[in-house]
Structures are given as structure tokens and as C-alpha cells.
Image (tube, rainbow, N blue to C red):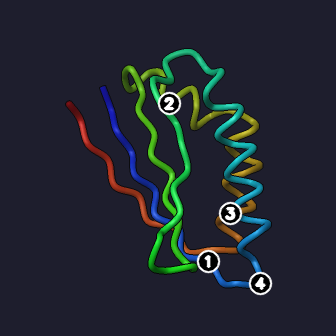
Amino acid sequence: MLRLNCFIRVSKENRKEVLDAAKRLTEASLKQDGCVAYDIFESATRSDVMMICETWRDQEALDAHSASDVFAAEVGIMNSLAEMKLETFSF
């Protein structure tokens, strides 16, 4: 399995739009084959930090997710409005 933690740092002005894109991405991702878990977390101490935590069955499922239209659209929005950092773990 693969776990990804995507840390998102966003300004107050762009926070709602980034969170809305992350929610749309989460809703669609949970329906994709091979998605084990997908959720958004907001920092309790920093209003400019969020994290998407996702778990995929295997690399093939993650590759299909990454190639999807919804991924391109929503991650495109988030990338244009926020700073993103990705951590990947295999287990």
C-alpha cells in the first residue's frame, strides 16, 4: 500500500477556494478503484496549513488517480493558489 501526505500552505485569501477544491478531489477520489482512504485535515494551530492524507492499494491505482481529469483540475487549482509538499510512504 501507499500513503501520501500532501501538506498545503495557503493564504487567508485563497483558503476557501483551496479547501473547496480539496473537498471535490476527496469526494471523487474515494470513488476510485484502489482508494483505501482519502481525507483532508486542518491544522488546529495554524490557519494557513492543511493536509490531504491518502492511502492507495498499489502504484497502479495511484497512477490511475494521478492521471484522472478530476485530479488534474482540482490539483491545478490548489497548485495555483497554494504551496504544496508531498510525502510518500510504502507499507
Residue 80 locus on image (x, y percent): 71, 71
Q: CA distance from mark 3 to mark 4?
A: 13 Å
Crowding at mark 3 (Cα within 10 Å: few <14, some 14-19, many 20+): many
Image quadrant in which you'd find residue 39: top right
Q: Which residue is mark 3?
A: 78
Q: Which residue is mark 1?
A: 10
The front one of 11 and 63 is 11
Give, as a three-letter code, the residue at label 1. Val
Residue at 45% x, 78% y is: 45
Give, as a three-letter code, the residue at label 2. Asp
In the picture, measured across the screen, residue 5 lies left or right of residue 47, that is left
Q: Which residue is mark 4?
A: 13
Q: Which residue is mark 2?
A: 63
> Label 1's element?
strand
Residue at 57% x, 79% y is: 47
Residue at 68% x, 63% y is: 78
State which tag comes first along the sequence, 1 or 2.
1
Which callout, 3 or 4, points to the residue nearer the camera? 4
Residue 84 locus on image (x, y percent): 51, 67
> Label 4's element?
loop
> Label 2's element?
helix
Q: Is residue 16 above or below residue 66?
A: below
Q: Is residue 42 above or below residue 24?
A: below
